[in-house]
């Protein structure tokens, strides 16, 4: 009797996550009714104009903002992370390589809000006053900060998998007279292309899901930027901002549409990355 | 020949990348330390209030980090108290049993671990809006925030437990069977004690995540100024929230310095938790 009870409890606990995901989706679908029932507002969702006063609830600029910010951050984080992996595994002197690994581990533990806070007081004034980037709060500022935050996200899993794989190739490559750098560059890395893509996708998911850096650094203007010096608004920040300013209205319901869109995008990159490493 | 050139270029670039990262990390720490320095004195936690009277709740702390520190700690502990038993139970079920529903729950745990925290916060906030229809006094609070944070960190103990159980040697399972243990006896008296370090690492990582997240509590009960919460139904202050708010508006230079000190404190706490988790993980793998 007790065995069956504890078995049932275990199974129930395993379903909490399922329950919550389903509940969240149902909740969003239910609360978004004002929007789903208004064909004009629903059609405007796909547009690029966010102007609730005129009945336009275009999320295009915000979704594009998410993509732009993510790609900006990844353009910095991925090469930098990969180079750090190379340095740690083969190219750097042992002491420095160990030190870099420690620093990467520490950086992975730095709270997002600390990155954002330092960037607000260090990077933004520098961009504004020395580099002449308009207000400073911009696509560029958010991308640089987010990119730095994502370097450990890219580097640590790669180091974790590549270090043993590279070590196991060592005897063969040594016998062939291939140097450590050559082994890593021409043998180990090409053999792990799916893993690298999967890590890229994980980082993309984190970049899109992050709220704090975007909210505090991107300037949050709800239109498309013309250059990296312009502000932009991403979906996650849009959710936070709409809730802070609005109450009961169709604009409010558009928040659920943003959430569903963001959730779909993040889940997609997550799923793809799982597929790749399996 | 070209390959040689590529190798040279990659080696140079990797040195540059490593040095850049060192420089950026050092700059960040130095910048934090320099700006936090004016606030790093005996008044950091309690300000002008008397420490003892503030601790027993007789005096409000207006210019210290004490309420935010207590708020963050309470939030983390309550969230962990919810998430740890649930997560361990879910991890056991996912590792030791098999059914279509459990495979689905594994996928959902993955999905939950990738869920943007702002969406989790929003769903908690919506729950309160719905609850208000039944019970008008329902409001955002420490309890709601802790529940949402618990969902945010649920994947950590779940995955840690599942993986620790799956890594157990087959000989251990055979030994338990040979002794005539029932499955539940084996799980609770042999497997789980054997997995405690892996689970511990998951719990500590979960604490770190709970401590640093702002997006969830932004929508579910964190406020800029309240003092120490009297019950779980009160709103609360939190360190990361205080840092975020101060980035956009602050009263005086003192508050700004205090936010830098808070960032340093949060960084220290996170680093501590991370190091602890690494230690535990290292032990559990060996």
Image: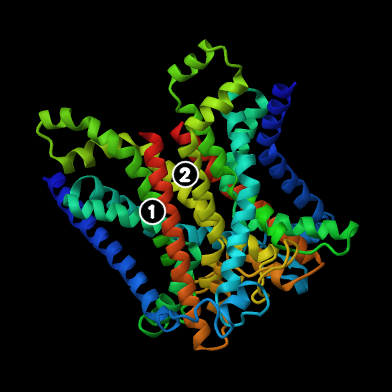
Task: From the viewer's perspective, tell me whether residue A109 is left or right of residue A39.
Answer: left
Check whether the beta carbons of the residues at disc 2 and disc 1 lie within 8 A of each other. no
- Expressed as whole percent of the image width and height from the top left, the position of residue A150 reads 42, 56
Task: From the viewer's perspective, tell me whether residue A61 is left or right of residue B31.
Answer: right
Quadrant where the N terminus of chain A sits is top right
Q: Which residue is mark 1?
A: A152
Vertical side of A200 occupied by A188: above or below: above
Tell me, for residue B153, which label it has, or none.
none
On what subunit does the disc labeled 1 rest?
Answer: A
Q: Which residue is mark 2?
A: B201
Q: Residue at x 49, y 18 (%)?
A: B173
- Expressed as whole percent of the image width and height from the top left, the position of residue B182 reads 61, 17
Q: Badge 1: few (under 14), some or many (20 or more) residues near its Cα, within 10 Å?
A: many
On what subunit does the disc labeled 2 rest?
Answer: B
Q: Which secondary structure lies at badge 1?
A: helix
Q: Badge 2: few (under 14), some or many (20 or more) residues near its Cα, within 10 Å?
A: many
Report the Cα–Cα distance between label 2 and label 1: 19 Å
* Quadrant position of residue A39: bottom right
> Between A198 and B113, which is closer to the camera in this rendering?
B113
Looking at this view, name the residue that lies furthest to the bottom: B252
């Amino acid at each position: 009797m007790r065995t069956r009870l504890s078995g049932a409890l275990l199974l129930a606990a395993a379903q909490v996550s399922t329950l919550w995901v389903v509940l969240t989706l149902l909740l969003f679908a239910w609360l978004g009714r004002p929007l789903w029932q208004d064909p004009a507002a629903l059609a405007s969702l796909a547009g690029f104009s966010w102007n609730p006063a005129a009945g336009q609830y275009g999320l295009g600029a915000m979704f594009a903002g998410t993509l732009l910010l993510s790609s900006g951050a990844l353009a910095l984080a991925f090469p930098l992370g990969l180079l750090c992996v190379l340095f740690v595994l083969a190219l750097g002197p042992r002491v420095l390589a160990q030190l870099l690994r420690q620093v990467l581990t520490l950086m992975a533990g730095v709270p997002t809000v600390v990155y954002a806070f330092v960037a607000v007081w260090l990077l933004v004034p520098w961009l504004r006053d020395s580099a002449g980037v308009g207000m400073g709060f911009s696509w560029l500022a958010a991308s640089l900060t987010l990119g730095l935050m994502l370097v450990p996200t890219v580097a640590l899993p790669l180091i974790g998998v590549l270090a043993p794989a590279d070590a196991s190739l060592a005897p063969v490559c040594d016998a062939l007279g291939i140097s450590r750098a050559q082994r890593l560059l021409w043998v180990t890395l090409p053999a792990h292309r799916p893993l690298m893509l999967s890590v890229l996708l994980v980082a993309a998911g984190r970049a899109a899901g992050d709220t704090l850096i975007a909210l505090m650094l991107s300037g949050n203007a709800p239109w498309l930027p013309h250059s990296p010096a312009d502000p932009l608004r991403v979906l996650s920040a849009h959710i936070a901002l709409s809730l802070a300013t609005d109450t009961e209205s169709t604009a409010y319901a558009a928040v659920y549409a943003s959430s569903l869109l963001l959730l779909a995008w993040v889940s997609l990159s997550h799923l793809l990355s799982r597929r790749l490493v399996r | 020949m070209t390959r040689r050139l590529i190798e040279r270029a990659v080696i140079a670039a990797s040195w540059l990348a490593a040095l850049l990262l060192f420089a950026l990390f050092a700059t960040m720490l130095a910048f934090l330390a320099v700006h936090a320095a004016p606030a790093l004195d005996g008044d950091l936690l309690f300000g002008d209030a008397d420490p003892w009277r503030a601790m027993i709740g007789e005096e409000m702390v207006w210019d210290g980090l004490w309420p935010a520190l207590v708020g963050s700690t309470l939030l983390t502990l309550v969230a962990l108290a919810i998430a740890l038993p649930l997560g361990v139970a879910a991890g056991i079920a996912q590792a030791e049993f098999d059914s279509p529903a459990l495979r689905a729950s594994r996928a959902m745990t993955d999905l939950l671990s990738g869920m943007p925290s702002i969406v989790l916060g929003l769903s908690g906030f919506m729950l309160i809006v719905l609850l208000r229809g039944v019970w008008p006094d329902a409001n955002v609070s420490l309890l709601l925030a802790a529940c949402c944070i618990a969902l945010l960190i649920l994947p950590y103990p779940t995955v840690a437990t599942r993986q620790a159980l799956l890594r157990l040697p087959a000989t251990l399972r055979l030994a338990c069977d040979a002794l005539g243990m029932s499955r539940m006896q084996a799980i609770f008296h042999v497997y789980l004690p054997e997995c405690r370090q892996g689970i511990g690492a998951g719990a500590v990582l979960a604490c770190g995540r709970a401590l640093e997240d702002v997006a969830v509590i932004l929508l579910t009960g964190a406020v800029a100024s309240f003092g120490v919460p009297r019950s779980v139904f009160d709103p609360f202050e939190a360190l990361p929230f205080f840092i975020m708010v101060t980035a956009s508006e602050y009263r005086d230079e003192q508050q700004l310095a205090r936010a830098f000190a808070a960032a340093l404190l949060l960084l220290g706490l996170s680093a501590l938790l991370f190091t602890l988790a690494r230690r535990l993980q290292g032990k559990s793998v060996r």
